[in-house]
Amino acid sequence: ARQAPHDVFGALDLLKQGQWRDLPSDLRLVMDRYETSKENLWSSQEVKERWHMAVRDKLIRGEVGNMKKTNTKSLWKVSLNGGIVKLTHGNPKQIGSKSIYPLEAYLTVLSTAVPARWSLLSVEVRVQAKTGESNHQLDTTNRQRYDLHRICAKCMTVEEDRAENEGHLSRPLDCFFQVAHNFS
């Protein structure tokens, strides 16, 4: 295997002048910020509990909790498993022992800060051809699934930023639903 070229000029600068002039500006990316954080002192059980509490807090204080307070019908069926939120929409189709939904997404929060932001883990849109129609155009490519994931994550971020700047309740799950529903 070929090795990386030696930095002869960098070594000469260091030996002659005692400093390396061409030091990369993104050297701080090499450092592990976890080592110097307060979370480093927490046990793995405490990290897990705080993560689960952050997700529950996001659900209760966010648009899902607001829908419960105002008796608004949700577009999603929401289920919580640890720190992962599963959103489903539509009537499930049984395939073996598994229920497959037309629209399914998994979300979490990656921070215990308040307010935490949603992070989209995955989104699946499954549509079925109508009677007499061809199914070949409904099968999505990996690129289409990747683009859908990026667009949905971006619309959620934009909605949370807008709500933060304007000072009202953010509705990222509603924006996410609209984008995913239009895609299908």
Image (cartoon, rainbow, N blue to C red):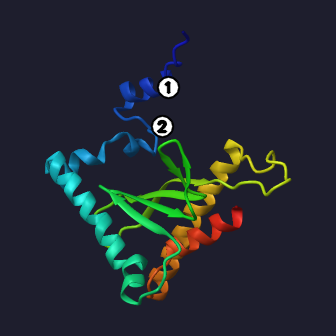
Q: Earlier in the sequence, mark 1 or mark 2?
A: 1
The quadrant in which residue 92 appears is bottom right
Which residue appears at 45% of the width and 45% of the height?
A: 26
On the image, the x and y values in percent for residue 37 come to 22, 53
Which residue appears at 44% of the width and 24% of the height?
A: 12
On the image, the x and y values in percent for residue 126 come to 64, 53
Front residue of 17/84: it is 84
- Say whether marks 1 and 2 touch (CB < 8 Å): yes
Which residue appears at 59% of the width and 55% of the height?
A: 149
- Position of residue 30 relative to residue 103, above or below, is above
- Position of residue 83 relative to residue 40, above or below, is below
Q: Which residue is mark 2?
A: 22
Residue 124 numbered tag: none
Q: Is residue 181 left or right of residue 106?
A: right
Amino acid found under the numbered disc labelled 2: Asp
Amino acid found under the numbered disc labelled 1: Phe
